[in-house]
Amino acid sequence: MKIGFIGYGSMAEALASRWVGHHDIVIGGRNVDKARALAEQLGHNTHWGREPDAVVDIDVVVLATTHQSVFEAMDAAGGPSAFDGRTLIDINNPVPGAFDGEFLNSNYDGLSLAEKIAGYAANAQVVKAFNMCQASVWKMQPPVFDGRKLVVLHCGGDEAATARAVELIELFGCDHVDIGELKYARLLEAAASIVIKLLFSGRDPHTVLNLIQPEVKVR
Ligand SMILES: NC(=O)c1ccc[n+]([C@@H]2O[C@H](COP(=O)([O-])OP(=O)(O)OC[C@H]3O[C@@H](n4cnc5c(N)ncnc54)[C@H](OP(=O)(O)O)[C@@H]3O)[C@@H](O)[C@H]2O)c1
């Protein structure tokens, strides 16, 4: 696969580090020097450029700017039609007030950011994934906690795009659970807000999210 990243920050670095060597990577963004620095750090003939370079002739585009700049960055990449036929992985958590103690995630007329992205790039196949854990978790090799593999939740609804996302999740050595159509990104974004609140308040999310599998009775 050819994977383009729009953005070269912590998440781009963490995700691309795991996929490089398995797939062709292009790092693109508004500052070519920063894109080049990450590409050179990644090695394996990783290419770099501006936003369009992360989209043209690319199979999977990862939207890895700040959540506030997603649409500006997509405009810079060439606008809605530039994403036609692409698998678009939305990793963003729209929690604009986190540093001010406000953890409610933004919604977009009742929709998630992922759905808003799908509305913008109508001929792309959007998958929400990788938003539930911080960059340092994606740098773990592999992400295993108390002997248990990390389970990556994702949603989207398009079969081919989901298969690509699953292939990329598996490169982390993680399990994966498809929680359904893209509308379930509303839950993933809200769930990430809770996780972020726990992390910002110094609480260990493990102590909150440990659950016991109920006995399922078949009627
Ligand atoms: N960090 C995490 O642990 C984590 C975990 C899960 C999800 N996420 C989500 O992943 C996304 C990326 O997070 P991150 O931690 O990787 O961010 P980051 O390290 O702060 O990097 C932000 C990236 O966005 C670019 N950017 C900022 N404003 C821009 C604009 N107006 N136009 C174009 N590009 C712009 C930055 O480029 P410049 O350097 O040129 O400003 C940089 O490449 C966020 O939406 C976040 O919610 C983060």
Image: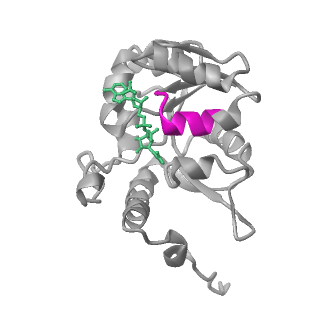
Q: Nearer the viewer, residue 114 or 192?
A: 192
Q: Residue at x 35, y 39 (%)?
A: 67
Magenta stretch containing residue 14, yes or no?
Answer: yes
- Residue 217 in sight here: yes
> Which region shows up in magenta?
7-16
Prevailing secondary structure class for the magenta stretch in the rendered image: helix
Residue 53, image x and y in percent? 52, 13
Height in image: 146 above or below 121?
Answer: below
Magenta stretch containing residue 61, yes or no?
Answer: no
Q: Quadrant of residue 146?
A: bottom right
Q: Where is the C terminus found, in terms of image quarters?
A: bottom right
Numbered circles on residues, count: 0
Height in image: 123 above or below 144?
Answer: above
Height in image: 186 above or below 54?
Answer: below
Q: Residue at x 71, y 15 (%)?
A: 45
Q: Nearer the viewer, residue 70 or 178?
A: 70
Residue 204, image x and y in percent? 50, 71
Q: Nearer the viewer, residue 106 or 111?
A: 106
Residue 196, image x and y in percent? 40, 59
Q: Residue at x 41, y 67 (%)?
A: 198
Q: Nearer the viewer, residue 38 or 15?
A: 38
Q: Residue at x 46, y 13 (%)?
A: 32
